[in-house]
Image: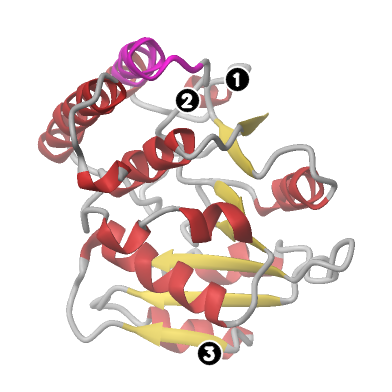
Amino acid sequence: MYEGKKVIVVMPAYKAALTLEKTYHEIPHDWVDEVILVDDHSPDNTVEVAKAVGIKHVIRHDKNLGYGGNQKTCYTKALELGGDIVIMLHPDYQYTPMLLKAMISIIGNGLYPVVFASRILGKGALKGGMPMYKYIANRLLTLFQNIMIDQKLSEYHTGYRAFSKEALEAVKFTKCDDDFIFDNQMVLQLFWKGFEVGEVTCPTKYFDEASSINFKRSSIYGLGVLWYSVRYRLAKWGWKWDLMN
């Protein structure tokens, strides 16, 4: 535990067999109480690798539920196990587990209830190989969101996120979409509920084994980000939206 708080790392996995072991072994296990891996019906041996490296809580979906659907299972299980600090770490080694201590301490010491590891603070994104079109889209979408939501994050699209128990329990994550837009629906709810989000700079790696959505799905995700940001602004002006009420 950290400062008397139970720390749980959740790993939403899909075809992570080649990178899972390296990611898992870099987790600071003296700071982390439990690790949960949820496999979204991978065609490879992700589940077998997870069990072999010693992950105690391994859940496999009988069918692919999508990135958001996977996270729903992750967070539900983490709260069920009594997690006070819950961090999502992708098992594809795109994000370094070495930032876990920093993110845990920020929440554990009461500085912020939510922490994002940003690839945009500093030069981590391009240096790590993020495609230029994704970098430009990230910057434009983030600018638009900051205007619509009246916030000042450097990045809304990172997959490396830490939450306090209070933050997770305050949002309706089970009602969010099952696809990639889940992440943005989560952060909109957090801001709606008055939670502040801290950021730490994060190096990242793009390589063949790292998960990445293609141009078509990126475009669909981008349009969803624009639409839900507008809906957030409309909700602030009194338009009813169930996710925010």
Nearer mark to the viewer, of 2 and 3: 2
Q: CA distance from mark 1 to mark 2?
A: 8 Å
Snapshot quadrant of residue 82: bottom right
Q: CA distance from mark 3 to mark 1?
A: 35 Å
Q: Position of residue 11 (x, y in %)?
A: 49, 66
State which region is magenta.
Answer: 137-151
Neighbours of disc 3 within 10 Å: few (<14), some (14-19), many (20+): few
Residue 17 in view in this figure: no
Name the residue tied to disc 1. 121
Q: Amino acid at mark 2?
A: Glu
Residue at the spot 89% in from the left edge and 61% down from the top edge: 3
49 to 200, vertically: above or below: below
Q: Position of residue 107 (x, y in %)?
A: 74, 48
Q: Earlier in the sequence, mark 1 or mark 2?
A: 1
- The one nearer the camera, 55 or 185, is 185
Q: Are marks 2 and 3 in contact (CB under 8 Å)?
A: no
**Image check: 23 left or right of 103?**
left
Residue at the spot 43% in from the left edge and 30% down from the top edge: 156
- The one nearer the camera, 207 or 30, is 30
Q: Are marks 3 and 1 in contact (CB under 8 Å)?
A: no
Q: Main secondary structure of the magenta part?
A: helix
User: Please, what secondary structure does the residue beneath circle 2 have?
Assistant: loop
Q: Are marks 1 and 2 in contact (CB under 8 Å)?
A: yes
Nearer mark to the viewer, of 3 and 1: 1
Q: Position of residue 201 (x, y in %)?
A: 66, 28
Name the residue tied to disc 2. 155
User: Please, what secondary structure does the residue beneath circle 1 have?
Assistant: loop
Q: Quadrant of the C terminus?
A: top left
**Image check: 44 left or right of 89?**
left
Name the residue tied to disc 3. 51
- The one nearer the camera, 237 or 22, is 237
Q: Earlier in the sequence, mark 2 or mark 3?
A: 3
